Amino acid sequence: MSKTQRLLSMTTAIVVASTSFAFAEPSAELIAAAKKEGMLTTVALPHDWCGYGDVIADFKKKYPEITVNELNPDAGSADEVEAIKANKDNKGPQAPDVVDVGLAFGPQMKKEGLLQPYKVSTWSEIPDNVKDAEGYWYGDYYGVMSLLVNKDLVKNTPKDWSDLKKPEYAGQVALAGDPRASNQAILGVLAAGLASGAKAGKEAGEAGLKYFGELNKAGNFVPVIGKSGTLAQGATPIVVMWDYNALAAKDTLAGNPPVDVVVPASGVLAGVYVQGISAYAPHPNAAKLWMEHLYSDAGQLGWLKGYCHPIRFNAMAKANKIPKDLLDKLPPAAAYEKAYFPTLEEVDANKAAVTGAWDSVVGANVK
């Protein structure tokens, strides 16, 4: 299961200050202890995902005394969990120090005793409900549902979910997956439901089904899995997908065709990944230093360069810490301030509603 497939979400919250374990920057003691360990073992971090290649390179440059041992870059969250379980008593190079997993795995790993707590110095800028209060896991970056639009074929770029019902978008709208199986597509239906004013969970799932049913009946919905290739070919001129996928596709297409990436005016749905340190980490201090790197301004901007919104995005934007050239590559910052992070319970209820009734309510065989 790829990282895209395992993207899940959590509820939004007001940021509050936290003083426990807080400090301005990595202490000299932590840096010295990490250097003494001399190694950091990561797992499931492909270099082309969220800018991780440069993030890792920056860590190596800053701490050349620490070797970064990268295990199985293309693994999924379940693989990361199993890697920790399989190496509980192994202090060798096959034992991960840190994990980057889909949100659902954070609470699961804490419950199973696979993580150890640690609160980075920028802890207070991580929204409360996308982190474990005790510091066992914490949100690191997120994306929001967006529309990737082929400007050669779509005369007027849609601005909101309601626009997609207009006759001018006949035969143009697709999901980036089969909503009976694809997490990205299932959450696309949830986003449409939220835009109607429905409450997140089963209610929004049912509202989203009704929306896509109307879209299909009007002839606007295309039962084809939307990708950058199908968009370029004209089979799916408008594709509902995560913004970081859409922005990466924009780079790949390089103007052929020209595209727009739009965060809808309503129903702005976000999805989060989380970090954690293995309870059995062979290099616990290097792991803590790695977390300090990831949640520093530089680390957060590294993810942003890969089009994944760092978890501290709102706080950094308000503090004018985000370079204009990076912001210019993204949809307006105001769009992200309205992002809603559904709880795990809401995600599960929506999934049950969508997968259980897509065929009967929408009746489009997406493939």
Image (cartoon, rainbow, N blue to C red):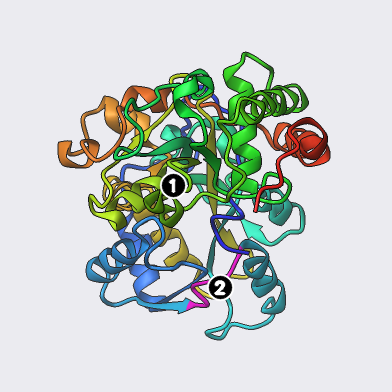
Nearer-the-camera pick, 25 or 155: 155
Q: Where is residue 340 in the image (x, y as percent from the top left)?
A: 54, 26
Total numbered badges shown on the rendered structure: 2
Picture quadrant of residue 75: bottom right
**Camera-side mark, 2 or 1:** 2
Disc 1 residue type (three-letter): Val
Q: Where is residue 241 in the image (x, y as percent from the top left)?
A: 49, 43
Nearer-the-camera pick, 17 or 78: 78
Task: Find residue 273 and name its label.
Answer: none
Span of residues in magenta: 71-76
Q: In this view, does 240 lie above or below 284?
A: above
Q: Which residue is drawn at 40% across and 25% down?
A: 158
Q: Mark 2 points at which residue?
A: 96
* Residue 13 appears in the figure: yes
Question: Residue 74 magenta-drawn?
Answer: yes
Dominant secondary structure of the residues highlighted in magenta in the image:
loop
- Spatial distance from mark 2 to mark 1, Cα to Cα? 19 Å
Q: Where is residue 44 in the image (x, y as percent from the top left)?
A: 52, 68
Q: Is mark 2 on a helix, strand or loop?
A: loop
Question: Residue 268 magenta-drawn?
Answer: no
**Sequence-wise first label, 2 or 1:** 2
Q: In which quarter of the image is the C terminus?
A: bottom right
Q: Residue at x 73, y 59 (%)?
A: 113
Q: Position of residue 359 (x, y in %)?
A: 79, 39
Q: Mark 1 points at which residue?
A: 120
In this picture, residue 322 sits left or right of residue 125: left
* Residue 8 appears in the figure: no
